[in-house]
Image: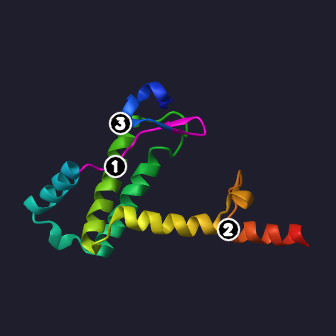
Amino acid sequence: MSPALDAADFSAGDQRTAQGLAYRNDTMKQETIDRIRKFTSDRDWEQFHTPANLAKSIAIEAGELLECFQWNETDFDVEHVSEELADVLVYCRNLLDELGLDEDEIVNSKMTKNEAKYPPELARGSAAKYTELKQQAREEAE
């Protein structure tokens, strides 16, 4: 079952649109972060949460998420996708904690770099890597 999301799927306060698509204003709530931390602490799993172990766990769970779409990109189980995505997010949260990183800070830092690599006038509508985009721009300028 493929979810066709539109504005009706979101509450009025949680809507924003970009290119006709509706998005939720999804920031992980502190209550959820605290719940993840408590889950880990209650089981004494911090001892296993090295950056390398958490990075491997993210990759493993991302593979399980990808598996949801292995043979069909349009007919998938949204509940299974959400469970695998939740696993990825929990491990990401744990890695942020382990490294003492702030998600807003690192995402904004990376977005600044991406915006420089992929200016809209070169990247709009293209899936090319930034090095290819710059090469194409050089060739067109010649």
Residue 133 location, quadrant? bottom right
- On the image, the x and y values in percent for residue 1 come to 46, 29
For the residues labelled 3 and 1, the Cα–Cα distance comes to 20 Å
List the residue tagged with mark 3: 79
Q: Residue at x 33, y 54 (%)?
A: 89
Q: Residue furthest top?
A: 8
Q: Residue furthest right?
A: 142
Label 3 Cα neighbours within 10 Å, binned few <14 / some 14-19 / many ≥20: few
The amino acid beneath tag 1 is Thr
Whether 1 is drawn above or below 53: the answer is: above
Dot in front, 3 or 1: 1
List the residue tagged with mark 2: 130
- On the image, the x and y values in percent for residue 68 come to 44, 44
- On the image, the x and y values in percent for residue 112 come to 53, 67
The amino acid beneath tag 3 is Glu
Dot in front, 1 or 2: 1
For the residues labelled 1 and 2, the Cα–Cα distance comes to 29 Å
Dot in front, 2 or 3: 2
Q: Which residues are magenta?
A: 17-29
The amino acid beneath tag 2 is Tyr
Whether 37 is drawn above or below 24: the answer is: below
Q: State the SS at label 2.
A: helix
Q: Is residue 25 magenta?
A: yes
Label 2 Cα neighbours within 10 Å, binned few <14 / some 14-19 / many ≥20: some
List the residue tagged with mark 1: 27
Residue 120 lies left or right of residue 96; in this view the side is: right
Q: Residue at x 25, y 67 (%)?
A: 97
